[in-house]
Image: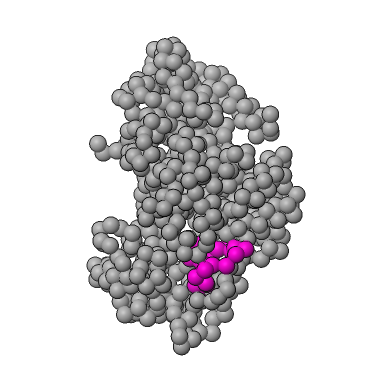
Amino acid sequence: MCAGERHMNLSTGIAALLLTIAAPASAQESATLYRGGPIVTMDGDTPQTVEAVVTRDGRITFAGSEKEARAAAGQDVAVRDLKGATLLPGFIDAHSHFTVATMSAGGLDLRDTAHGAITDIPGVQAVIRSHVARSPAKPGGWTTVWQFDQEVLAEKRYITRAELDAVAPDRPLVVLHVSLHGAVANSAALKAVGIDEATPVPPGGMMLRDDMGKLNGVLLEKAMFLLLAKLPQPTAEQKLAALDDAQSAYFAEGYTHAQDGATLPPDIAFLTSAAARERLKIDLALLPFSTGLDALLANPDLKFGAYQGHVKLQGIKFVLDGSVQGRTGFFTRDYQRGSPEGHHPWHGEPILSEADFIAQAKKVHDRGWQLFVHANGDAAIDMAVRGFDALGINATDNRRPVVIHSQFQRRDQLPAYARIGVGPAYFSNHAWYWGDVHRTNFPTEVVDFISPLRSARAAGLTPSNHSDYSVTPLDTRFMLWTSMARVSPTGIVSGPDERIDAYAALQALTTGPAWQIFEEGRKGRIKAGLLADFVILDRNPLTTPVDDIKGIKVRETIKEGRSVWRAAN
């Protein structure tokens, strides 16, 4: 039995004991008994179902036959008839950007289907122009546009500063790339944050230029932060209102646990504040960005790994490379289409030097904090592996470093993950959104191994799957489908041998992410002693044909025994 299993069994046993002795029956809430539909426990390596579940005081007290459940619940019990719907553990967000959900209100979302098909740069300009006309800004007010993706446009390039000036010459305007690894600013925005022709390009960043050698407004990777760091911040009241909307969006997808995958200092302060903690119902794990590491290490009041209400600081997030669809991911082979600036040969470059990564990661590791590392390209993954080895991490230590995305992993890197004890957080939605784009840059055998969930499991790893919201939508059933189908809009399957079945796909949304954050003894399964966190679906994913998986609907989300979201009908 490994250390993690011993910890899990001990935690579960203690929790179950406390349920029976911690308070007299008169002080406990009445029990709730769920029955009348498939109840998939996710407890074990093969599908297991039970007839009934009993909850009390936010915890599961029994899971088994209905007869035994009624006896365990006693007389004071509320019965919930599922009426054929399927009960599962609440979904756990392995990686997304929760704070984006609190920031995007009032901006323009280019993926909104209400705009119709946007196929070229003039189409983008038209939608922005219409939005600006409908949203008059105060003097100096900013306009933010989300989800720009040059790969869906005829020109296959970024919109430029000049093209944004033609739409909105007088107000600061910023267009964020879908990957969240780049932005385009108009002249007013560049002036507002003090970026001009003399501004030096930060290491690990790019500032693209036009044919005349002038800045064209495109800022990639670390250069983007010159802009974002100076954007106006919402008021505390606006953030609190947005917080309610954000957690509702996660609850609507069946999530009972969310993650903010690169938390900046102002958001740490806000999300751990008393006002925010009072509003939060969803469990929220924060990954402070490594750029503020020294200040975090110097703050004795920060506690990692422990909840304050529903929020906790989980670990530190390092970014080693960029996005593959933006051609800033770091590879051992060249992009066929070259760099974003048009340079050949180009295989990307690291955002953080290997020496700096190891030095900073050592500080985190020595403090006992968990390491989260963004690595998309195989060369970036090599950096992560060498860094973990330099720190002496191995699986028996049970430190569970997480490599977020692990997108273009090589097969030979899987044994290293197993040796170190890495939890790979995969991103199967790439097969749909950018599988065809990746094939314009890399050979078939490379693209066919993206997010290798099946091979990772065979190698003894505990993988998870994520949306990376807002990079792709918060749609849990779509994520199940992409991990099972791995198909692109043109019908090309990226790695037929890496497709997984529905149970493995559900594990990547429940038990996998729970293990990666050391919470397998609290959530991810339906078992006595664990939190009463559930999602109710209108159909059972285990018996639904693959092509119909993405059509499954969330009926209700339950957090610690209380309904927090319910479908309108």
Of the 4 image quadrants, the one containing the C terminus is: top left
Name the main secondary structure of what is drawn in magenta. loop
Residue 222 placed where, x, y %?
55, 69
Task: Give the image's coloring scheme.
Answer: one colour
298 or 396, nearer to the observer: 396
Say which residue appears at 54% left-offset and 76% top-offset. Answer: 343
Say which residue appears at 62% left-offset and 63% top-offset. Answer: 332
State the extent of the magenta-drawn residues as a range. 321-341
Residue 316 placed where, x, y %?
61, 53
11 is within the stretch colored magenta: no
Residue 26 placed where, x, y %?
45, 17
Residue 495 placed where, x, y %?
49, 49
The correct choice, above or below, for 266 with respect to 508 in the image is below
Name the side, left or right, on which 389 lies relative to 564. right
Total labels: the figure holds 0
362 or 382, nearer to the observer: 382
The answer to whether residue 274 is visible is no
Say which residue appears at 58% left-offset and 43% top-offset. Answer: 456
